[in-house]
Image (spheres, helix red, strand yellow):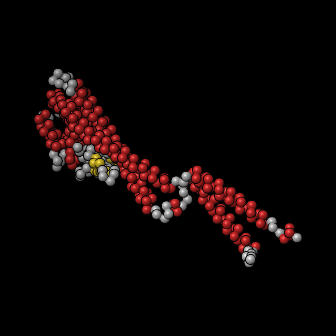
Amino acid sequence: MPVVSVGDMSQQFISMRNGGTIKTELARLSESLSNGLVSDVTETLDGDTTRLSGINYSLEQLGGYAQAAEETSQTLANIQNVLGRLDTLRSDSSAQLLLINGESTINQIDNAARDGARAFSVMVTTLNTQVADRALLGGADVTGAPLATADVMLTDLQATIGGATDFATIDAAITTWFDDPAGGFATNAYLADTGAPVEKRISDTRAIPIEARADDPAIRETLKSAAYAALADSLPGLDRDTKAAMLEQAGRGLYSAASDLVSLQSRIGTAEAEVEQSQTETNAQLSALQIARNDIVLADPFETASQLQSVQIQLETHYSVTTRLSQLSLLRFI
């Protein structure tokens, strides 16, 4: 029988190659056990990575929608806070102004007018609230305050009223200034976007319109009523009866504005509910896809540990055999 001999150099090369292969496998299994991931996804999937690519794409897309929904939810919550603060100012001011009547003293009238002026100023400041340097009530325009300051509005109103001191003329001037779509409030007070409501896409099938702006009729009517009281404090030459009439008009108007503000808050609340529902659906999809992805890319820790132990034994055996072979000598047999 012919004998095939292997030279010492060849034997050493084969031993090194086998040892390297075992070490590579040991390193691969150690990494998988350490980070919990399979080391070669392509091999695990037999080269077909289409399903994993689809899952990763869907996860990325849903992650973007989840972020957009969270930002939209925060924006809507901030708008609700602003509207709630505005409604509180409206309610408090209305309650005080409705106490003014024909029997009120001049001191009571003047005090109510001063409080009304402060309330108007705080209302405007509240509506100009910005979060992270972004206006809440300016529609698509988020770069600046949506409303001019209270002082600018009152100055413009005073110029419109001119030197009139009777209630009928003042009432007509205020009404025109606030209601004229081509002037007054529309051009000199509201400084932001006037286009269609901004829509925030939060899923493939759902876009949420953010309809609240500082020129909303409910907000405009609230400011209009509050302006009567503010002007009662600042217009020169008004007698007691005219001031009282303006304060009474302010009180009635602020009281009546409640329903429209509630309606606006309700619309924002409906949008919040839609966002919350969408977030629930998106999170459910994200969880399902993450589980599917984990089934592909996560290594079974028990199976990996078993394979690692087997390879360790194999490497120890390889070293043992290599050591014994290196100790073979002709002198041991002669």
Q: Residue furthest front?
A: 1
Against 315, residue 209 (above or below) is above
**Who's the residue at 26% across and 31% down the image?**
91
Residue positioned 16% across, 30% down in the render: 245
Residue located 74% across and 78% down the image: 2
Identify which residue, 217 or 128, lies in the foreground.
217
Residue 310 rendering spot, x and y as whole percentages: 65, 56
Residue under the image location 17 percent in, 24 percent down: 101
Horizontal side of residue 318 vs 293, given as left or right: right
Q: Residue 22's spot in the image, x, y percent?
A: 65, 62
Q: From where the camera sits, is residue 151 visible? A: no
Residue that lies at the very extreme toward the bottom in this rendered image? 2
Horizontally, residue 47 falls left or right of residue 208, namely: right
For the residue pair 5 and 179, the one nearer the viewer reads as: 5
On the question of residue 19 being in view, the answer is yes
Q: Quadrant of residue 38?
A: bottom right
Identify the residue at the far left of this view. Answer: 168
Q: Position of residue 239 (x, y in %)?
A: 16, 29
Q: Seen in the image, is 146 located left or right of residue 10?
A: left
